[in-house]
Amino acid sequence: MDYVEARAALDRLPRLEVKPGLSRVEQLLDALGRPERSVAAIHVAGTNGKGSVVAMLDAVLREAGLRVGRFTSPELVDFRDRIAIDGEWLPEEAWAAAVARIEAALADVTDPPTQFEAIAAVAFEAFAQRAVDIAIVEAGLGGRFDATNVVRPRLSILCNVSLDHTGVLGDSIERIAWEKAGVAKRGIPLLYGDLPPEALSVVRAECEAVGAAAAPAVELPVECVARSWESARYRVERPGLPEALDLGLLGGYQRDNLRIVLRAIELLRDGGLNISERALSEGLRAARWPGRFEVVRRTPNAVLEGAHNPAAAAWLAADAETFVSDRPARHLLLGVLADKDVFGIAAALSDSFEYATFCASRSPRALPAKRLYEDVGHLFRRPAWYDSVEGALDRIVPDMTDEQTLFVAGSLTVVAVARRWFEEAP
């Protein structure tokens, strides 16, 4: 089997259907000899911030001299970017070899695995085969019944909890918190970020029930003291941590993610990992993550920010006002998936943007641009719409002045298309 055949086998699997439960991924892992059991892991769950926390930890631990595996979703640059080892995507031949070993299990017509479950199995196989020192594994959806919850972590992380994927995880903070807190394991620290009270009580109860050590991050003092289009500087007041840190991730929400990462480093040190202050500083300075307040063009500026739920959209609104003080100089390009809180996302952005152009990605889950315009266009003073992301960019960008900034948001499927457009644009 070559990579093209492996991709075809994976693409035949359900991609949009969410099937909670671990039985299918365990069947795949049985066929591979249970590779996840030999992999030390950091398991990262949460509504927002997972990818940024993974990116920061990946950069720091590699700077500390460790061989690091990384599993994230969805892909943004290329299908293979979900699985990386030492910062390099898994080679095509390794994908092909792993898929070939589970090909029979993929053909289960009674209860076929999802594509996500199959890719998770490929990741664990790759990490075991390449003997990573540690794998940083991002949960796909929820946590308790997510395919990644087969890992044996040395640290579990819950970044935050807010309303998202309510059709699958439940329509209350308490229910979603219960799903995500399911990553807690006996005897393993569960590090958690700033949680609303109703989520915090659920998380603490889960830790007590399973015997996990609850480890809050909110008490660690971290303050953003400066931000530019290139980096953000933070002040930290904690023995054993650098007093000043430069971070390559610019969004205002990264303060909370940074706090989680710094507390994670403390816990990993307590567990025996040697992570110097130099590795911490240099790793955070080098950390990048596509589609999270990513500046892809200057003068005029263009920023990509997934912002696929109301909480993330509120952060984007605040950041847009911080970086671009003149409201008419901000232009929003928004595309949203139909199963998201479309009104909540748009409402969070409407006070910060006068110009809003609506579009749709090619995802089968995308809300058509005209429908998006009809549903929420009235929230903005100057709305417009185009059928495609490319069509909108073709019209907007050439007419921008050097003082303007375009913010592309609403879905990583939209951000992915926009990112390619800017890479290919003259």
Image (cartoon, rainbow, N blue to C red):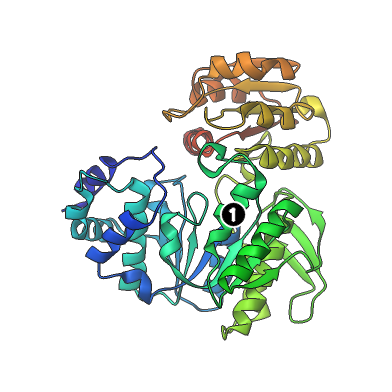
Residue 357 in the figure: left or right of residue 88:
right
Amino acid tagged 1:
Trp
In this rendering, position of residue 186 left or right of residue 116 = right
Identify the residue at image location x=36%, y=76%.
38
How many tags in the picture? 1
**Residue 259 location (% of width, % of height):** 72, 64
Q: What's the residue at 60%, 21% (across, down)?
A: 358
Residue furthest to the front = 209
Q: Is residue 51 visible?
A: no
- Rendered view: 60 above or below 19: below
Asked if residue 407 lies left or right of residue 99, the reply is right
Q: Please give left or right for residue 179 compared with residue 298 in the image.
A: left
Dot 1: element: helix
In percent of width and height, residue 172 lies at 64, 42
Question: 374 or 280, which lies in front?
Answer: 374
**Placement of 18 over or under 241, stated as above or below:** above
- Label 1 CA crowd tier, 10 Å (few <14, some 14–19, many 20+): many
Question: At 52% from the left edge and 72% from the top edge, which residue is drawn?
Answer: 62
Estimate the x, y position of residue 171 in percent, counting from the top left: 61, 39
Residue 164 location, quadrant: top right
Q: Closer to the camera, 51 or 218?
A: 218
Q: Which residue is mark 1?
A: 178
**x 75%, y 31%: residue:** 403
| Residue 199 in view here | yes
